[in-house]
Structures are given as structure tokens and as C-alpha cells.
Image (cartoon, rainbow, N blue to C red):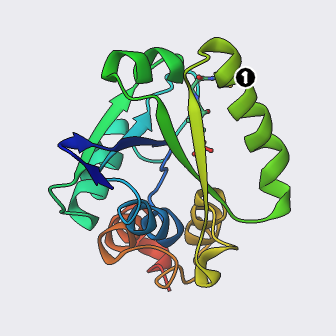
């Protein structure tokens, strides 16, 4: 959407531990609606992650080398980050009804904290509605094949983490 020089930007926040084909599907769809996307990786020192924040950012950049996509990280409240960036719209993917309750809470709490805040939901593609980073981590760590669930560079990174399992 390009209105008289106005650039429509949205922030796509998440843990991305790691990036999956479901996330990529949302990024591609998001770029049909927004001119620019800021993919914002949550840096939560209190939560154990499989990939460090810089590793997660690098994997996203490699998988999505598009000048319309900026990859960044944030700590603390999302509303503080969106205000700092001057962007008040975030993008979130919805896979199934089970996602809805949590997303509804998140969207409303964020709007309570910042009345200008808006959440745009997009449905993931049919091929990725069952993919989550948590399941990818579990399947990969137990030696299952995740090659169709994540982009090739993430698949390689998982193989490096779990060499004995070979990833397949
Ligand atoms: O990929 P995820 O884990 O579903 O993403 C969740 C995320 C990062 C969007 C959410 O946990 C978040 O915004 N965390 C930052 C802290 C915050 O603002 N919490 C209050 C939101 S109601």
C-alpha cells in the first residue's frame, strides 16, 4: 500500500526460535499488504532459547534477503519497542482456533497499554498451519525430518546443533 509517499510499515514480532516456513509464509503475505516489515526478535534473557538472538536474526536475514525486510531485536515490552520505532501496527500469524485465545489476549493487552496499537492477523498457508517452532525444536532434537518445515539455512543450523541425528 503506497499512499502519496506514505510508507506502510508493520512490525512482525516473535521468538523465531527458529524461523519456520510458517513464519516465512506470513512475511511473504505481509509484504503484499505492507511496504516494509520489521521482523523483531524477542530477546528474553529469562527464557532459555535454542538459538541465541543474533543467530536467530542472522537466520532470518539469510532466509529473507529482501530490502523491504528489516531484522531487529527487542527486549521488554513490545509496546515500548513499537513506540520507539514509531510503528503502531503489528502483524501476527494465526494457524488455528487454538491460537486465537492467546492472540486475542495479547492484542487487547497491547492496546490497553497503548491505545494506538493495532494487530493485523494473517492466516498461514495451508502447508504450514501445523508448524510451530516448538515442534520443530522437538522433532529436530529427536532426529525427525524437519527439512520441509523450515528454510534450508535453518535446516543446516539444526543439523549442526544435532549432528548425531543427521536431521533426517
Ligand atoms: O513467537 P511468539 O513467542 O508467539 O511471540 C510472542 C511475542 C514475542 C509477540 C510476545 O511474547 C511479546 O510481545 N513479548 C514481549 C513482552 C510483552 O510485551 N509482553 C506483554 C504482551 S501482552
State whether residue 35 appears in this view.
no
Residue 123 location, quadrant = bottom right
Is the CB–ligand 1 distance for label 1 below 8 Å? Answer: yes
> Does residue 87 sit above or below 99 in this rendering?
above
| Residue appearing at x 47%, y 79% in the figure | 167
Residue assigned mark 1 = 109
Residue 94 location, quadrant = bottom right
Q: Position of residue 4 (x, y in %)?
A: 20, 45
> Does residue 119 sit above or below 109 in this rendering?
below
Q: Position of residue 99 (x, y in %)?
A: 77, 54
| Residue appearing at x 36%, y 67% in the figure | 154
> Does residue 46 sit above or below 18 in this rendering?
above
State whether residue 168 appears in this view.
yes
Hey, which residue is sitting farthest front in the picture? 4
Horizontal side of 61 relative to 86 (left or right) equals left
Badge 1 crowding class, 10 Å Cα cut-off, few under 14, some 14 to 19, many 20 or more, is some
* Circle 1: element type: helix
| Residue appearing at x 39%, y 38% in the figure | 40
Q: Position of residue 73 (x, y in %)?
A: 35, 32
Q: Quadrant of ligand 1?
A: top right
Q: Position of residue 47 (x, y in %)?
A: 58, 29
Amino acid at each position: 500500500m503506497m499512499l502519496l509517499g506514505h510508507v506502510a510499515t508493520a512490525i512482525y514480532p516473535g521468538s523465531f526460535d527458529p524461523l519456520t516456513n510458517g513464519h516465512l509464509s506470513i512475511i511473504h503475505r505481509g509484504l503484499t499488504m505492507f511496504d516494509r516489515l520489521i521482523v523483531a526478535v524477542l530477546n528474553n534473557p529469562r527464557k532459555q532459547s535454542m538459538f541465541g538472538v543474533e543467530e536467530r536474526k542472522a537466520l532470518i536475514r539469510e532466509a529473507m534477503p529482501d530490502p523491504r525486510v528489516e531484522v531487529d531485536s527487542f527486549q521488554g515490552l513490545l509496546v515500548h519497542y513499537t513506540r520507539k520505532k514509531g510503528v503502531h501496527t503489528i502483524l501476527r500469524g494465526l494457524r488455528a482456533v487454538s491460537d486465537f485465545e492467546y492472540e486475542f489476549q495479547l492484542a487487547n493487552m497491547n492496546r490497553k497499554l497503548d491505545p494506538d496499537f493495532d494487530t493485523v492477523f494473517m492466516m498461514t498457508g495451508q502447508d504450514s498451519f501445523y508448524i510451530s517452532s516448538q515442534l520443530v525444536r522437538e522433532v529436530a532434537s529427536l532426529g525427525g525430518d524437519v527439512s520441509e518445515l523450515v528454510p534450508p539455512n535453518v535446516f543446516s543450523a539444526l543439523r549442526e546443533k544435532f549432528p548425531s541425528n543427521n536431521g533426517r
